[in-house]
Image (spheres, rainbow, N blue to C red):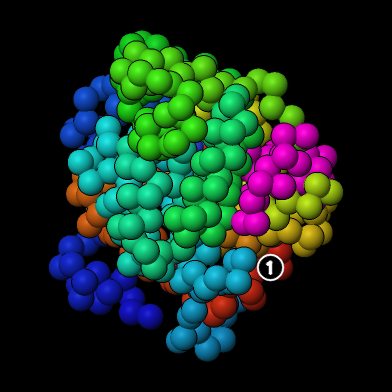
Amino acid sequence: MGNVFTRIGESTGDYPLFAGEWEKRAREILPAGPFGFLQSGAGDEVTLGQNREAFNDYDILPRVLRDVSNVDPSIQLFGQEQSLPLMLAPVGFQGIFHSEKEIGSVKAAAAAGIPFVASTVTSASLEEIAAAAPKAVKWFQLYWSKNLDLTASMARRAEEAGYQAIVVTVDTGLLGWRKRDYRNGYSPLKLLQGAANYIHDPVFQDMVPQLTEKHIRDAILDNIHHPNLSWDDLRFLRNQTKLPIVVKGILHPADARQVVDLGLDAIIVSNHGGRQLDGAIASVRALPAIVQEVDEAVPILMDGGVRSGADVFKAIALGADSVLIGRPYVYGLVADGQAGVSRVIGDLRTELELTYALSGVTRTAEISSAYLVKR
Ligand SMILES: Cc1cc2nc3c(=O)[nH]c(=O)nc-3n(C[C@H](O)[C@H](O)[C@H](O)COP(=O)(O)O)c2cc1C
Ligand SMILES: O=C(O)C(=O)c1ccccc1
Protein backbone atom coordinates (compact mmCIF):
# COMPACT_ATOMS: atom_id res chain seq x y z
CA MET A 1 0.00 0.00 0.00
CA GLY A 2 1.45 3.37 -0.97
CA ASN A 3 0.42 6.46 0.79
CA VAL A 4 -1.98 8.69 -1.03
CA PHE A 5 0.68 10.89 -2.59
CA THR A 6 2.96 8.17 -3.88
CA ARG A 7 -0.03 6.19 -5.16
CA ILE A 8 -1.62 9.10 -6.94
CA GLY A 9 1.72 10.40 -8.18
CA GLU A 10 2.58 7.01 -9.64
CA SER A 11 -0.70 6.38 -11.34
CA THR A 12 -1.94 9.66 -12.76
CA GLY A 13 0.24 12.54 -11.68
CA ASP A 14 -2.93 14.14 -10.35
CA TYR A 15 -4.14 14.85 -6.89
CA PRO A 16 -7.38 13.06 -6.12
CA LEU A 17 -10.71 14.68 -6.75
CA PHE A 18 -13.38 14.17 -4.14
CA ALA A 19 -17.06 13.39 -4.38
CA GLY A 20 -18.18 17.01 -4.34
CA GLU A 21 -15.67 17.95 -7.04
CA TRP A 22 -16.75 15.16 -9.37
CA GLU A 23 -20.33 16.27 -8.82
CA LYS A 24 -19.39 19.86 -9.68
CA ARG A 25 -17.77 18.72 -12.92
CA ALA A 26 -20.85 16.69 -13.81
CA ARG A 27 -23.05 19.72 -13.18
CA GLU A 28 -20.90 21.78 -15.58
CA ILE A 29 -20.99 19.12 -18.28
CA LEU A 30 -24.56 17.83 -18.25
CA PRO A 31 -27.77 19.63 -19.22
CA ALA A 32 -30.13 20.35 -16.31
CA GLY A 33 -32.45 17.42 -17.10
CA PRO A 34 -29.96 14.54 -16.92
CA PHE A 35 -27.98 16.19 -14.11
CA GLY A 36 -31.09 16.70 -12.00
CA PHE A 37 -32.17 13.12 -12.63
CA LEU A 38 -28.77 11.88 -11.41
CA GLN A 39 -28.23 14.13 -8.42
CA SER A 40 -31.65 14.68 -6.93
CA GLY A 41 -33.71 12.73 -4.44
CA ALA A 42 -37.44 12.31 -3.97
CA GLY A 43 -39.65 14.86 -2.21
CA ASP A 44 -37.77 17.36 -0.07
CA GLU A 45 -34.62 15.21 -0.25
CA VAL A 46 -34.71 14.52 3.48
CA THR A 47 -33.74 10.88 3.06
CA LEU A 48 -31.08 11.84 0.53
CA GLY A 49 -29.50 14.11 3.15
CA GLN A 50 -29.95 11.64 6.00
CA ASN A 51 -28.14 8.92 4.05
CA ARG A 52 -25.00 11.08 4.43
CA GLU A 53 -25.76 12.53 7.84
CA ALA A 54 -26.31 9.14 9.44
CA PHE A 55 -22.67 8.17 9.03
CA ASN A 56 -21.98 10.86 11.63
CA ASP A 57 -24.01 8.88 14.19
CA TYR A 58 -20.85 6.85 14.70
CA ASP A 59 -17.18 7.51 15.25
CA ILE A 60 -14.35 5.14 14.52
CA LEU A 61 -12.44 4.02 17.60
CA PRO A 62 -9.00 3.23 16.20
CA ARG A 63 -6.29 0.98 17.59
CA VAL A 64 -2.61 1.84 17.31
CA LEU A 65 0.85 0.26 17.37
CA ARG A 66 -0.09 -2.71 15.28
CA ASP A 67 1.81 -3.59 12.15
CA VAL A 68 -0.40 -2.17 9.41
CA SER A 69 2.20 -2.11 6.65
CA ASN A 70 0.30 -4.73 4.69
CA VAL A 71 -3.39 -3.97 4.17
CA ASP A 72 -5.60 -6.28 2.11
CA PRO A 73 -9.27 -5.21 1.95
CA SER A 74 -10.37 -8.02 -0.41
CA ILE A 75 -13.43 -10.14 0.40
CA GLN A 76 -15.28 -13.20 -0.93
CA LEU A 77 -18.93 -13.00 -1.90
CA PHE A 78 -20.84 -15.96 -3.38
CA GLY A 79 -17.48 -17.70 -3.71
CA GLN A 80 -16.03 -14.89 -5.84
CA GLU A 81 -13.06 -12.81 -4.77
CA GLN A 82 -13.43 -9.04 -5.00
CA SER A 83 -10.55 -6.68 -4.34
CA LEU A 84 -12.57 -4.33 -2.11
CA PRO A 85 -15.82 -4.52 -0.12
CA LEU A 86 -17.31 -2.26 -2.79
CA MET A 87 -19.51 -2.70 -5.85
CA LEU A 88 -20.93 -0.41 -8.51
CA ALA A 89 -24.68 -0.09 -7.87
CA PRO A 90 -27.21 -0.51 -10.67
CA VAL A 91 -27.73 2.88 -12.29
CA GLY A 92 -29.90 2.91 -15.36
CA PHE A 93 -29.77 5.06 -18.47
CA GLN A 94 -26.00 5.64 -18.49
CA GLY A 95 -26.14 6.73 -22.13
CA ILE A 96 -27.60 10.03 -20.93
CA PHE A 97 -24.41 10.58 -18.91
CA HIS A 98 -21.58 9.63 -21.28
CA SER A 99 -21.20 8.09 -24.74
CA GLU A 100 -19.35 5.11 -23.22
CA LYS A 101 -22.53 4.35 -21.24
CA GLU A 102 -22.40 1.19 -19.05
CA ILE A 103 -19.46 -0.14 -21.06
CA GLY A 104 -17.15 2.46 -19.48
CA SER A 105 -18.41 1.59 -16.02
CA VAL A 106 -18.18 -2.19 -16.34
CA LYS A 107 -14.64 -1.97 -17.75
CA ALA A 108 -13.55 0.22 -14.84
CA ALA A 109 -15.12 -2.26 -12.38
CA ALA A 110 -13.35 -5.14 -14.14
CA ALA A 111 -9.99 -3.36 -14.03
CA ALA A 112 -10.45 -2.67 -10.30
CA GLY A 113 -11.56 -6.23 -9.51
CA ILE A 114 -14.94 -5.19 -8.11
CA PRO A 115 -18.42 -6.34 -9.23
CA PHE A 116 -20.66 -4.34 -11.53
CA VAL A 117 -24.43 -4.47 -11.17
CA ALA A 118 -26.16 -3.86 -14.51
CA SER A 119 -29.63 -2.30 -14.30
CA THR A 120 -32.62 -3.51 -16.30
CA VAL A 121 -32.92 -0.04 -17.82
CA THR A 122 -29.41 0.19 -19.24
CA SER A 123 -28.45 2.00 -22.43
CA ALA A 124 -26.32 -0.95 -23.60
CA SER A 125 -27.94 -4.40 -23.52
CA LEU A 126 -26.92 -6.87 -20.83
CA GLU A 127 -25.27 -8.98 -23.55
CA GLU A 128 -23.20 -6.03 -24.82
CA ILE A 129 -22.13 -5.21 -21.27
CA ALA A 130 -21.10 -8.82 -20.64
CA ALA A 131 -19.17 -9.00 -23.91
CA ALA A 132 -17.27 -5.80 -23.06
CA ALA A 133 -15.99 -7.22 -19.77
CA PRO A 134 -16.23 -11.01 -19.93
CA LYS A 135 -13.95 -11.52 -16.91
CA ALA A 136 -15.68 -9.04 -14.61
CA VAL A 137 -17.95 -10.24 -11.85
CA LYS A 138 -21.34 -8.98 -13.00
CA TRP A 139 -24.77 -9.09 -11.39
CA PHE A 140 -28.02 -8.29 -13.17
CA GLN A 141 -30.59 -6.04 -11.47
CA LEU A 142 -34.05 -7.12 -12.52
CA TYR A 143 -36.99 -4.79 -12.71
CA TRP A 144 -40.03 -7.00 -12.55
CA SER A 145 -42.22 -6.90 -15.64
CA LYS A 146 -45.97 -7.36 -15.50
CA ASN A 147 -45.53 -9.97 -18.19
CA LEU A 148 -44.03 -12.89 -16.28
CA ASP A 149 -42.57 -14.43 -19.43
CA LEU A 150 -40.62 -11.21 -19.95
CA THR A 151 -39.37 -11.30 -16.35
CA ALA A 152 -38.27 -14.91 -16.75
CA SER A 153 -36.68 -14.19 -20.11
CA MET A 154 -34.51 -11.39 -18.72
CA ALA A 155 -33.37 -13.59 -15.84
CA ARG A 156 -32.53 -16.37 -18.31
CA ARG A 157 -30.61 -14.03 -20.60
CA ALA A 158 -28.58 -12.76 -17.66
CA GLU A 159 -27.70 -16.30 -16.63
CA GLU A 160 -26.73 -17.20 -20.21
CA ALA A 161 -24.59 -14.08 -20.57
CA GLY A 162 -22.55 -15.02 -17.49
CA TYR A 163 -24.05 -12.79 -14.80
CA GLN A 164 -23.53 -14.35 -11.40
CA ALA A 165 -26.51 -13.09 -9.40
CA ILE A 166 -29.94 -11.56 -9.94
CA VAL A 167 -30.71 -8.45 -7.92
CA VAL A 168 -34.45 -7.84 -7.56
CA THR A 169 -35.17 -4.24 -6.67
CA VAL A 170 -38.33 -4.06 -4.55
CA ASP A 171 -38.59 -0.37 -3.66
CA THR A 172 -39.73 0.93 -7.06
CA GLY A 173 -43.21 -0.56 -7.53
CA LEU A 174 -44.14 3.03 -8.24
CA LEU A 175 -41.69 5.77 -9.06
CA GLY A 176 -40.98 8.24 -6.23
CA TRP A 177 -42.09 11.87 -6.15
CA ARG A 178 -39.30 13.33 -8.28
CA LYS A 179 -39.81 17.06 -7.94
CA ARG A 180 -36.66 18.08 -9.78
CA ASP A 181 -37.53 15.91 -12.75
CA TYR A 182 -41.04 17.36 -12.85
CA ARG A 183 -39.57 20.91 -12.81
CA ASN A 184 -37.23 20.00 -15.63
CA GLY A 185 -39.89 18.05 -17.50
CA TYR A 186 -37.39 15.22 -17.66
CA SER A 187 -38.11 11.50 -17.86
CA PRO A 188 -35.50 9.21 -19.43
CA LEU A 189 -38.04 6.45 -19.99
CA LYS A 190 -40.28 8.78 -21.94
CA LEU A 191 -37.26 9.73 -24.06
CA LEU A 192 -36.84 6.03 -24.83
CA GLN A 193 -33.59 5.82 -22.88
CA GLY A 194 -32.85 2.58 -21.06
CA ALA A 195 -34.76 0.44 -23.56
CA ALA A 196 -31.91 -1.80 -24.78
CA ASN A 197 -32.76 -4.86 -22.66
CA TYR A 198 -36.38 -4.72 -23.76
CA ILE A 199 -35.70 -4.22 -27.45
CA HIS A 200 -33.26 -7.16 -27.44
CA ASP A 201 -35.66 -9.49 -25.66
CA PRO A 202 -37.42 -12.20 -27.71
CA VAL A 203 -40.50 -12.17 -25.45
CA PHE A 204 -40.72 -8.38 -25.69
CA GLN A 205 -40.39 -8.58 -29.47
CA ASP A 206 -43.35 -10.96 -29.58
CA MET A 207 -45.34 -8.77 -27.20
CA VAL A 208 -44.76 -5.62 -29.22
CA PRO A 209 -45.22 -6.58 -32.82
CA GLN A 210 -44.45 -3.12 -34.16
CA LEU A 211 -41.18 -1.90 -32.66
CA THR A 212 -41.96 1.77 -33.18
CA GLU A 213 -40.82 4.30 -30.58
CA LYS A 214 -44.32 4.78 -29.26
CA HIS A 215 -45.08 1.09 -28.93
CA ILE A 216 -41.76 0.36 -27.24
CA ARG A 217 -42.17 3.21 -24.78
CA ASP A 218 -45.75 2.31 -23.93
CA ALA A 219 -44.89 -1.36 -23.45
CA ILE A 220 -41.97 -0.56 -21.13
CA LEU A 221 -44.01 1.92 -19.09
CA ASP A 222 -46.80 -0.60 -18.86
CA ASN A 223 -44.48 -3.37 -17.63
CA ILE A 224 -42.07 -1.59 -15.30
CA HIS A 225 -44.67 -0.40 -12.76
CA HIS A 226 -45.91 -3.23 -10.58
CA PRO A 227 -47.43 -2.02 -7.31
CA ASN A 228 -48.97 -5.49 -6.97
CA LEU A 229 -45.60 -7.26 -6.66
CA SER A 230 -45.50 -9.52 -3.61
CA TRP A 231 -43.40 -12.15 -1.86
CA ASP A 232 -45.14 -14.85 -3.90
CA ASP A 233 -43.60 -13.39 -7.03
CA LEU A 234 -40.15 -13.87 -5.56
CA ARG A 235 -41.05 -17.55 -5.07
CA PHE A 236 -41.77 -17.66 -8.80
CA LEU A 237 -38.34 -16.21 -9.58
CA ARG A 238 -36.67 -18.69 -7.23
CA ASN A 239 -37.94 -21.43 -9.56
CA GLN A 240 -36.77 -19.63 -12.70
CA THR A 241 -33.06 -19.29 -12.04
CA LYS A 242 -30.20 -21.14 -10.41
CA LEU A 243 -28.40 -17.87 -9.72
CA PRO A 244 -28.32 -16.39 -6.23
CA ILE A 245 -31.18 -13.92 -5.76
CA VAL A 246 -30.34 -10.66 -4.00
CA VAL A 247 -33.21 -8.47 -2.76
CA LYS A 248 -32.46 -4.74 -3.01
CA GLY A 249 -34.44 -2.14 -1.12
CA ILE A 250 -34.94 -3.73 2.31
CA LEU A 251 -35.20 -1.41 5.34
CA HIS A 252 -37.38 -3.32 7.84
CA PRO A 253 -35.96 -6.27 9.81
CA ALA A 254 -39.20 -8.26 9.31
CA ASP A 255 -38.74 -7.97 5.53
CA ALA A 256 -35.14 -9.09 5.91
CA ARG A 257 -36.47 -12.12 7.79
CA GLN A 258 -38.82 -12.87 4.87
CA VAL A 259 -35.88 -12.87 2.45
CA VAL A 260 -34.12 -15.47 4.57
CA ASP A 261 -37.26 -17.55 5.12
CA LEU A 262 -37.97 -17.68 1.37
CA GLY A 263 -34.52 -19.12 0.76
CA LEU A 264 -33.26 -16.07 -1.11
CA ASP A 265 -29.58 -15.36 -1.00
CA ALA A 266 -28.67 -11.82 0.07
CA ILE A 267 -30.06 -8.45 1.08
CA ILE A 268 -29.20 -4.93 -0.02
CA VAL A 269 -30.25 -2.50 2.67
CA SER A 270 -31.21 0.50 0.58
CA ASN A 271 -33.65 3.36 0.15
CA HIS A 272 -32.68 3.73 -3.52
CA GLY A 273 -30.33 6.59 -2.78
CA GLY A 274 -33.18 8.69 -1.34
CA ARG A 275 -34.95 8.62 -4.71
CA GLN A 276 -38.08 6.72 -3.73
CA LEU A 277 -39.77 7.20 -0.33
CA ASP A 278 -38.73 10.56 1.05
CA GLY A 279 -38.74 10.47 4.82
CA ALA A 280 -37.59 6.84 4.85
CA ILE A 281 -34.89 5.84 7.31
CA ALA A 282 -31.27 6.35 6.26
CA SER A 283 -29.71 3.10 5.04
CA VAL A 284 -26.92 3.09 7.58
CA ARG A 285 -29.46 3.58 10.39
CA ALA A 286 -31.54 0.65 9.13
CA LEU A 287 -28.52 -1.63 9.00
CA PRO A 288 -27.97 -2.68 12.65
CA ALA A 289 -31.48 -4.09 13.26
CA ILE A 290 -31.30 -6.04 10.00
CA VAL A 291 -27.87 -7.40 10.85
CA GLN A 292 -29.22 -8.54 14.20
CA GLU A 293 -32.33 -10.14 12.69
CA VAL A 294 -30.51 -11.97 9.91
CA ASP A 295 -27.73 -13.18 12.21
CA GLU A 296 -25.36 -14.14 9.37
CA ALA A 297 -27.91 -16.33 7.56
CA VAL A 298 -27.24 -14.42 4.31
CA PRO A 299 -24.81 -11.68 3.22
CA ILE A 300 -25.97 -8.14 3.88
CA LEU A 301 -24.94 -5.29 1.61
CA MET A 302 -25.93 -1.64 1.87
CA ASP A 303 -25.99 1.48 -0.26
CA GLY A 304 -26.94 5.12 0.08
CA GLY A 305 -24.57 7.96 0.87
CA VAL A 306 -21.32 5.99 0.84
CA ARG A 307 -18.71 8.56 -0.19
CA SER A 308 -15.50 7.92 1.77
CA GLY A 309 -13.23 5.26 3.16
CA ALA A 310 -14.60 5.99 6.62
CA ASP A 311 -18.17 5.42 5.37
CA VAL A 312 -17.25 1.99 4.00
CA PHE A 313 -15.42 1.14 7.22
CA LYS A 314 -18.39 2.17 9.39
CA ALA A 315 -20.88 0.16 7.31
CA ILE A 316 -18.72 -2.93 7.66
CA ALA A 317 -18.24 -2.35 11.37
CA LEU A 318 -22.05 -2.23 11.66
CA GLY A 319 -22.25 -5.65 10.04
CA ALA A 320 -22.43 -5.11 6.28
CA ASP A 321 -20.43 -7.55 4.17
CA SER A 322 -19.96 -5.03 1.38
CA VAL A 323 -21.32 -1.69 0.15
CA LEU A 324 -22.33 -0.19 -3.17
CA ILE A 325 -21.88 3.28 -4.59
CA GLY A 326 -24.24 4.86 -7.11
CA ARG A 327 -23.89 8.57 -7.93
CA PRO A 328 -20.14 8.89 -7.17
CA TYR A 329 -19.02 6.57 -9.95
CA VAL A 330 -21.53 8.04 -12.38
CA TYR A 331 -20.10 11.52 -11.75
CA GLY A 332 -16.73 10.05 -12.73
CA LEU A 333 -18.31 8.57 -15.86
CA VAL A 334 -19.80 11.93 -16.80
CA ALA A 335 -16.44 13.68 -16.42
CA ASP A 336 -14.16 11.19 -18.15
CA GLY A 337 -15.85 7.92 -19.13
CA GLN A 338 -14.11 4.72 -18.02
CA ALA A 339 -11.04 6.67 -16.88
CA GLY A 340 -13.18 8.81 -14.59
CA VAL A 341 -14.87 5.78 -13.03
CA SER A 342 -11.43 4.21 -12.52
CA ARG A 343 -10.21 7.30 -10.70
CA VAL A 344 -13.24 7.38 -8.42
CA ILE A 345 -12.73 3.73 -7.51
CA GLY A 346 -8.95 4.10 -7.22
CA ASP A 347 -9.13 7.10 -4.91
CA LEU A 348 -11.76 5.39 -2.75
CA ARG A 349 -9.52 2.32 -2.58
CA THR A 350 -6.56 4.40 -1.42
CA GLU A 351 -8.62 6.21 1.17
CA LEU A 352 -10.15 2.93 2.37
CA GLU A 353 -6.75 1.27 2.73
CA LEU A 354 -5.55 4.26 4.74
CA THR A 355 -8.67 4.06 6.90
CA TYR A 356 -7.97 0.38 7.63
CA ALA A 357 -4.33 1.09 8.47
CA LEU A 358 -5.00 4.12 10.63
CA SER A 359 -7.76 2.22 12.45
CA GLY A 360 -5.37 -0.63 13.18
CA VAL A 361 -6.79 -3.33 10.91
CA THR A 362 -5.26 -5.05 7.90
CA ARG A 363 -8.11 -7.33 6.74
CA THR A 364 -11.81 -6.65 6.15
CA ALA A 365 -12.74 -9.61 8.36
CA GLU A 366 -11.06 -7.94 11.34
CA ILE A 367 -13.49 -5.00 11.28
CA SER A 368 -16.17 -5.24 13.94
CA SER A 369 -18.39 -3.13 16.17
CA ALA A 370 -15.42 -2.90 18.53
CA TYR A 371 -14.10 -0.19 16.18
CA LEU A 372 -17.17 2.06 16.47
CA VAL A 373 -18.77 4.18 19.12
CA LYS A 374 -22.18 5.79 18.82
CA ARG A 375 -21.97 9.55 19.21
C1 LIG B 1 -29.46 7.99 -11.83
C2 LIG B 1 -29.76 6.78 -10.98
C3 LIG B 1 -30.39 5.69 -11.55
C4 LIG B 1 -30.65 4.56 -10.79
N1 LIG B 1 -31.19 3.47 -11.39
C5 LIG B 1 -31.39 2.35 -10.67
C6 LIG B 1 -31.87 1.19 -11.29
O1 LIG B 1 -32.08 1.14 -12.50
N2 LIG B 1 -32.09 0.10 -10.52
C7 LIG B 1 -31.84 0.09 -9.16
O2 LIG B 1 -32.05 -0.91 -8.49
N3 LIG B 1 -31.36 1.19 -8.56
C8 LIG B 1 -31.12 2.31 -9.28
N4 LIG B 1 -30.60 3.41 -8.66
C9 LIG B 1 -30.28 3.35 -7.21
C10 LIG B 1 -28.83 2.86 -6.98
O3 LIG B 1 -28.69 1.49 -7.33
C11 LIG B 1 -28.41 2.98 -5.52
O4 LIG B 1 -29.36 2.35 -4.70
C12 LIG B 1 -28.22 4.42 -5.05
O5 LIG B 1 -27.72 5.25 -6.08
C13 LIG B 1 -27.24 4.42 -3.87
O6 LIG B 1 -27.10 5.67 -3.33
P1 LIG B 1 -25.88 6.68 -3.68
O7 LIG B 1 -26.16 7.24 -5.03
O8 LIG B 1 -25.99 7.68 -2.58
O9 LIG B 1 -24.57 5.91 -3.62
C14 LIG B 1 -30.31 4.54 -9.41
C15 LIG B 1 -29.68 5.65 -8.85
C16 LIG B 1 -29.38 6.75 -9.61
C17 LIG B 1 -28.67 7.91 -8.96
O1 LIG C 1 -34.21 6.69 -11.25
C1 LIG C 1 -34.17 5.64 -10.61
O2 LIG C 1 -33.69 5.61 -9.48
C2 LIG C 1 -34.70 4.43 -11.16
O3 LIG C 1 -34.34 3.42 -10.65
C3 LIG C 1 -35.67 4.40 -12.27
C4 LIG C 1 -36.12 3.18 -12.70
C5 LIG C 1 -37.06 3.09 -13.71
C6 LIG C 1 -37.55 4.23 -14.30
C7 LIG C 1 -37.11 5.45 -13.89
C8 LIG C 1 -36.16 5.55 -12.87
Q: Position of residue 153 (x, y in %)?
A: 54, 40
The image quadrant where one finds the N terminus is bottom left
Horizontal placement of 318 versus 191: left or right? right
Mark 1 surroundings within 10 Å by alpha-carbon count, few (fewer than 14), some (14 through 19), many (20 or more): some
Task: Please give the range of residues in magenta.
Answer: 232-260
Is 236 colored magenta in this rendering? yes
Please name the residue shown 73% across and 51% down the image: 264
> Residue 241 or 34: which is nearer the viewer?
241
Q: Mark 1 — residue?
A: 368
State the image coordinates of residue 324 (x, y, percent, origin top left): 51, 51
Image coords of residue 174 (percent x, y): 58, 20
Tell me where residue 116 appears, x and y as whole percent. Answer: 44, 55
Q: Please say if 277 is above or below 54.
A: above
Q: Does residue 216 appear in the picture of this structure?
A: yes
Q: Vertically, is 5 above or below 195?
A: below
Q: Is mark 1 within 8 Å of ligand 1?
A: no
Q: In this rendered view, identify the residue nearer to me: 37 or 158.
A: 158
Residue at (15%, 68%) from the top-left corner? Answer: 13
Residue visible at 38% across and 37% down in the picture: 200
Q: Nearer the viewer, residue 11 or 16?
A: 11
Above or below, 106 against 177 in this view is below
